[in-house]
Amino acid sequence: MTLNVLLVGASGFVGRAILATLLVRRDVRVWTLTRRPLPVPAVPAHRQRLAELTRPESLAGCCAGVDAVLHAASYVGSDAELAERVNHLGTRWLTREVVAAGVTRFVYVSVAAVYGSGPHRGPAEGEIEARPTSARSASRLRAEAYVLGAGGQVLRPHLVYGPEDRWFVPATAAMLAAAPGWIDGGAARTSVINVRDLARLAVALGTAATPPAQRVHHANHPEPVTIREIGLALAREFGIAVPDGSVDLAEARRWARRAGIPDRQLTLFAADHWYDSTRVWRVTGQTPGPRLPNDLAGSAEWYRPLLAGRDAAHAERRPHG
């Protein structure tokens, strides 16, 4: 049986990885929903639906004839009003179309930042309350409510890396190159996932014959990594500078204020942010890829020019969430 799968947000960082995963599935016919046509020959023009989440009238009928909807579209900038319009209200309008079309497979890629600033040390799904601290993550949490209300599935990755990543690894490299030392020795543990693995999870959930009973999933590699491990791996693979010595959090905060680095971004490098992510691999039948320190070579072609010279030093300072 061939499944007709509509991918919303196919031109984004996560969306492109999901699209690549779908295109190698012989039992899937891919449809896309984007603001502009995609230059992807494998998705013919008649299966590329053009619409904008901020314009509900443009979404009318967008889910007709499909068996599954994978929603990977999101606004990740600093404009709170736009985050509300795209993430919250846009998902509301999209969910209305999903329900009207009778689609029962519906997956939304959200973010673990809905839990707030932490520290978070290994909670499983349902063991921690969502307390977003930014308008952006609050809008994602409100979007989740529509998806869950329609019987859909929600993925909550923390930090995502791999080809097309313009924030996590570049910002980490810039932070480490400028920092006065490892914050508390770089011992903070964090959850990460390769975007290709995140795509596999989204596709597995969206194409499952029977969706899992619990519908919110921590979507990360099951083994967290320390900030020091990440930094040393980047140094080995790409030659970036890493700190000498260690500083405590109070000293790091004084440095960050002088450098204009928001406290919630600094916190990502200073406090534990890891989540029990074992269950999603079990319920989807997927196998995690290599753990991050052993998993950079596959993304070297993307990161090496991005981290060269001033690119890393001027990486976009967008706080996660």
Image (tube, rainbow, N blue to C red):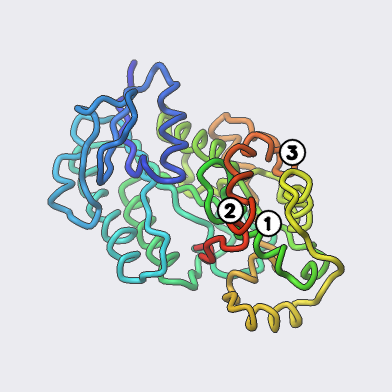
82 versus 236 height, above or below: below
The Cα atoms of the two marked residues, 2 and 3, are separated by 16 Å
Residue 172 horizontal side relative to residue 87, left or right: right
Task: Look at mark 3 in the image and give the residue it sits on.
Answer: 294
Q: Amino acid at mark 2?
A: Leu
Q: Quadrant of the N terminus?
A: top left
Percent x, y of residue 238: 71, 46
Q: Amino acid at mark 1?
A: Thr
Disc 2 vs disc 1: Cβ atoms closer than 8 Å? yes
Task: Look at mark 1 in the image and give the residue it sits on.
Answer: 190
Task: Look at mark 2 in the image and give the residue it sits on.
Answer: 159
Kindly report which numbered mark, 1 or 3, lies closer to the viewer in this rendering. Answer: 3
Count of marks placed on residues: 3
Near mark 2 (Cα within 10 A), the count class, few <14, some 14-19 or many ≥20, is many
114 versus 212 height, above or below: below
Q: Secondary structure at mark 3?
A: helix
Percent x, y of residue 248: 80, 77
Near mark 3 (Cα within 10 A), the count class, few <14, some 14-19 or many ≥20, is few
Q: Secondary structure at mark 1?
A: strand
**Residue depicted at 77% across the width and 73% down the height:** 180
The Cα atoms of the two marked residues, 2 and 1, are separated by 8 Å
**Residue depicted at 78% across the width and 46% down the height:** 236
- Of callouts 2 and 3, the N-terminal one: 2
Q: Of 247 and 267, which appears nearest the observer?
A: 247
